[in-house]
Image (spheres, helix red, strand yellow):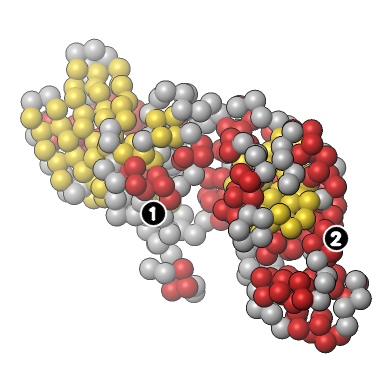
Amino acid sequence: MKAEEMIGKELREGFTTGATATAAMKAAVLAIHGEFPKRVTVLSPQRTELRLPVKEASAKGNIGTATVLKDGGDDLDCTHGTPIIVTVELTDTPGMELRAGKGVGTVTKPGLQVQVGRPAINPGPQIMLRYVYEELVAPDHGCIVTISIPKGEELAKQTLNPTLGVVGGISVLGTTGIVKPMSEDAYKRSLTPQVSVVWSAGIRTAVLCPGRIGERAAAIMGIPKESIIETSNYIGYMMEQCVAKGFTKMLLIGHMGKLVKVASGSFHTYNRNSDGRMETMGVYAAMNGAPADVVKEIMACNTTDGAAMVVEREGLNMIYQQMAERAQVRCERYIFGKSRMGVIFAGMDGSIQAISTRAKEILEEEKWNIH
């Protein structure tokens, strides 16, 4: 279902990858015991009962395998419909051992909820899996639980896992077992771990990029990839997360189309939440002597790139520097001066259009290339 089709419709909740893997584990253990239910009930970390369908299950001796399809409900989740396969081997040694099978990532950077070198199975799902172990495995026995997501390595390219240092596949996630569709809070929470990863790497200047254009510009300037934190549209929120972690220096680098909004005081830049781009550019053009017909022409543009053509033609390129300086003021005001904040405007190709005063200071301090 497309996002526009969801407007006005009551959205169906789904299940997290953690709940899905837990259901598959339970079905696998039951298969070892000769039971093959079409649905299983598992407990969320909060001990709420969740009931999920089982696609298939089989067993041979003390090894059982089950498949459950990830049901994301009406959430726009790349993992929706993905088979999650869990193999359980019962052992004579008490305890539960978790292993990453094909398509489940391994943590390679500190700062996440899982230790480096361990399978990317978050604490919430681990609690759910342990509930199954405690329910179905005899106290004097143990089990080895291997979670596989065959499409996981390909799906990981659509997530932040490569940035977070999770390699080889996706993470098994979920704090409640339930996916609430179109949850803005959930999406913001998915961005937040980047802050801890950058901090844990010993980096003390956070480089915030709303998207790929900012990342491209950062690379051109020689800024280490490890310093970059993706903000998406949640620029203000991610600034606050960085301040809370302890960052006292930040750079905001992005396409003018996003950062013009910041110059006008908008820190949630989704186009339905804020869009004063043409108004802002028109005002700055007028402040620099643009006649009314030029301002009207800018106001009539549909994109900032279109407006930029008018700006270039009229010799008004100084407005980019002025807007970058204003965005800098707005940013530092937003975080109550708790961090120095520089702003860099970039073109579609990653070329630099403007560097605010504070950004120049930070670039020089870090010995990153300004040109």
Q: Residue at x 34, y 42 (%)?
A: 153
For the point 43% across and 74% down, the residue is 5
Q: Which of the two discs, 2 and 1, labels the residue nearer the N terminus?
A: 1
Q: Is residue 310 above or below residue 23?
A: below
Residue 71 occupies which quadrant of the picture? bottom left
Spot occupied by residue 272 in the image (x, y as percentages of width and height): 63, 70
Residue at 83%, 39% (x, y): give it.
361
355 over 64 or under it: above or below: below
Q: Is residue 318 left or right of residue 119?
A: right
Q: Secondary structure at mark 1?
A: loop
Distance, label 2 to label 1, CA atoms, is 40 Å
Residue 258, percent across and down?
Answer: 68, 61
Residue 306 percent coordinates (x, y):
67, 75
Label 2 sits on residue: 322
Q: Amino acid at mark 1?
A: Cys
According to the image, label 1 marks what residue?
Answer: 78
Up the image or down, 366 lies above or below 257; here it is: above
| Quadrant of the image occupied by residue 131 | top left
Q: Is 310 placed above or below 130 here?
A: below
Quadrant the N terminus occupies: bottom left
**How would you rate the neighbour count of disc 1 (Cα within 10 Å): few for under 14, some for 14-19, many for 20 or more?**
few
| Residue 357 image point, x, y percent | 85, 47
Considering depth in this image, is 119 or 362 the residue closer to the camera?
A: 362
Checking the image for residue 38, the label placed there is none
Q: Nearer the viewer, residue 25 or 289?
A: 289
Amino acid type shown at disc 2 = Gln
Question: Would you say residue 231 is visible in this rendering?
Answer: no
Residue at position x 60%, y 48% in the image: 215
As helix, strand or loop, the secondary structure at mark 2 comes to helix
